[in-house]
Amino acid sequence: MNNAPLLSSRPLVPPAAAYYYLLLFPLAHLIAAVVANNNSLVIVNAATTTTTTTTITTTTKASFDKENEVKSILQRMENDALSFRDEIERVYASRCNVETLEECANANFYDCASTFSKEAECMTKEELVISACGDGVSCNALWDKKLSTISLPASLARGSRNNPNDEEVIESACYSRLAEPYMIRKYRNDEEYWSEYNVQPSWTYFGAHNGLFRKIPAIHQVTCGQYDPRRRPWFVAASSGPKDVVLIIDVSGSMDDYARLDIAKEAAITIVSTLTVADRVAIVTFSDTASTVGSFDSLVRATGENKRILVRAIGELKANGATNFYDSFRTAFDALDATIRRESTSGCNIAILFMTDGQITTGPGADEVIYLVNNRTEELAEKHGRKTTVFAFSLGLQADHAVAKSIACSTNGIWTPVDDFTGDLVSAMSSYYKLYASGLGEGGNEDFAAWVEPYPFANPAGKVGTTVSVPVYDRSVSPPLFLGVVASDMYMDAMEQVLGEDATSSTMLERFVLLSTARCPKIDLTECELDALRFLGGGEGATCGVCNATDYTGIVPEKCGLESDLPSDLWHNTEKEGKSYEERACCETSGGADPRRQLDVGFSTKSCPAVDSKSSSSKSSTGLIAGAVVALTAVFILGIFIRRRMQMNKPNDASENNNPGSSTVPPISTENFNNESTNQQQQQGNSADVEEMMKRLSSLEGITPVMPPEASAPPRSVDALEDLETAP
């Protein structure tokens, strides 16, 4: 066993109860095998007894040894994630230092525009294969194991050279940069550890609560501006813990206005996609009446298959009918009760996410709705010890803000208004995990870690892996301020080798269910802290008026000094700005013993069809443009030539007219003379300009001015790239 040292002095965390439960798997499997073989282990005599006992003992010991090794792998992953969390929390304390901000300027690499360092390499086929570049044999993608890169959602990269404008995002880039040496050492340690299993280490990364994402190794993003860590399962799982989630979606006729139903469907799909096997989920839709969707009458575990069923059902929703708030909440609470009776809940916090654009038009009124919600939440708390929070979202100006806000304020919930044109419902709905994140920073949850069930990675496509993630806090304030989530990926190859099981098997899934449901976050916020969360989500108008902004410490981040102290440009370089993914990322392998060679901008790509196709397309486009310029130039010159010929052949009317005083040509005045002189000068200037243009065209590579121009060949078609993500 490779005992590569961990990167910090953190002692090994004592195995949680979940790890001991893993040791029950061999015994359970053995019993199952006995039953499956029709009790073939029936004792016949003493000799048989001895042999059977020995066989059982040997088999059980081997199984326990395997489970212990798997436990060791998983425990190491958690310890490393916790150590990485400690490092981010340490460097956060230096975020406002002058040195931190000064040294941050032009010191970060942007994964959509920056050229990496000279240490960058072309991936080998054994390390990773990025199909967008090639098969890994002759062409692959570039990466840098000694650099971290930053990704930003498009909504954040709106400044000059795609820099962020938000001060807190800039601070996040600067303080997380201080953790880069740690990230480099960690990846080097990971390479040593995983080499024993002949497995490549995967990415390590930090997702800030504001959307900034820093990862190592450095790699270019396929679709710029699309990746947002806050919408990924590993982020939500670590920031909210196990939970029961019920989404209530208004599908009344008015939801067709301003495409509100489409907005609600997108938000619902995003929320469902971020859930993990530790969570339970149900979807309730309502108009005249309410019902659950996806053929489920209660909450179901958020496995990949169940999430796919729900996402398909959400996609088929249509708007029609009136608006019945009362029936929607009644159906939601009934589904929760049914789940609890069947003992299939997460056993943790309950989140009800309510989306509507309208006013109550049928069924009981606002007072009855508020009474129902209060009564049913109290029942869940008293009978089952479950804390229920309602998150209400009012879509559009016509929505009944008063009722939705009253429901939230009267049940210690959160209400957020979402504008038709400038609002972002998906981001607004993230308030639910921020509430739960506030409870994971203290109260026995300090070392909480979340696991995502094994799933196919995007890079390399189809390879199965998992992710362990841990929330990060500023613990100098109370309650601890949620900063984001650190995480590490792990390919499942090692566990498959040890256990002899497929990564997607049901028994493998059960292991991660046990790991993911070990603890429930305890939410114990004061009224002021809860009001601060409302303020973060919807401004002053979303608060319930119990506190003022001066009481929001610990929830609302404090800014670092003056804005002028922040760097105006984060990026080391933007040499690849505007280039296609192939041109930014793809590289040509040498084919030798060490097939790794960095290629500069404008490199030759004889062995890279993807880049060559882009290059050919670009050259063809250049040829078309040049051809058009040549054609227009030729027409211009021909026009001048014809005009001059016409002027030379025009008859002199004054000389042919023999009647003095009857001439039809006016006398040449000084003004007419000056105009004609000016025309001649312009024609001479035009001729000079044309001659100069022809010289410049001739100097362009592969372009020869021709009159009349020959037809240009059409550009070569380029297949559309898949949107491959570089992290889960």
Image (tube, helix red, strand yellow):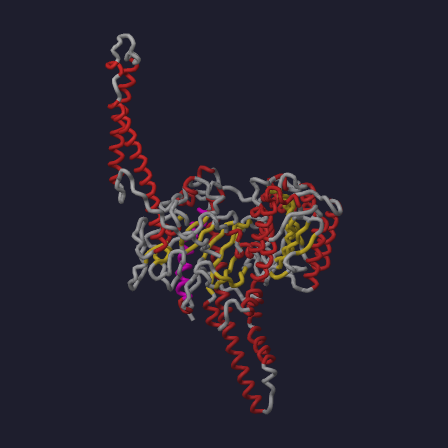
Asked whether, in this view, residue 673 is left or right of residue 42, the answer is left
Quadrant of the frame with the N terminus? bottom left
Q: Nearer the viewer, residue 360 or 595?
A: 360
In the displayed orientation, state which residue is furthest to the front. Answer: 658
Q: Residue 41: x percent and y percent?
A: 59, 85
Asked whether, in this view, residue 498 is left or right of residue 52, the answer is left
Tell me if residue 6 can be seen.
Answer: yes
Q: Which residues are magenta?
A: 173-194
- Tell me what residue is drawn at x 37 percent, y 54 percent: 610
Q: Residue 26: x percent and y percent?
A: 55, 75
- Tell me what residue is drawn at x 74 percent, y 46 percent: 362
Indicate yes or no whether the magenta region holds residue 175: yes
Q: Nearer the viewer, residue 617 or 234?
A: 617
In the displayed orientation, state which residue is furthest to the top. Answer: 661
Tell me if residue 349 can be seen.
Answer: no
Q: Residue 228: x percent and y percent?
A: 50, 50
Name the main secondary structure of what is drawn in magenta.
Answer: helix
Q: How many marks?
A: 0
* Residue 620 position (above or below residue 138): above
- Quarter of image, res 633: top left
Asked whether, in this view, residue 588 is left or right of residue 167, the answer is left
Q: Residue 548: x percent and y percent?
A: 63, 39
Indicate yes or no whether the magenta region holds residue 179: yes
- Quarter of image, res 218: bottom left
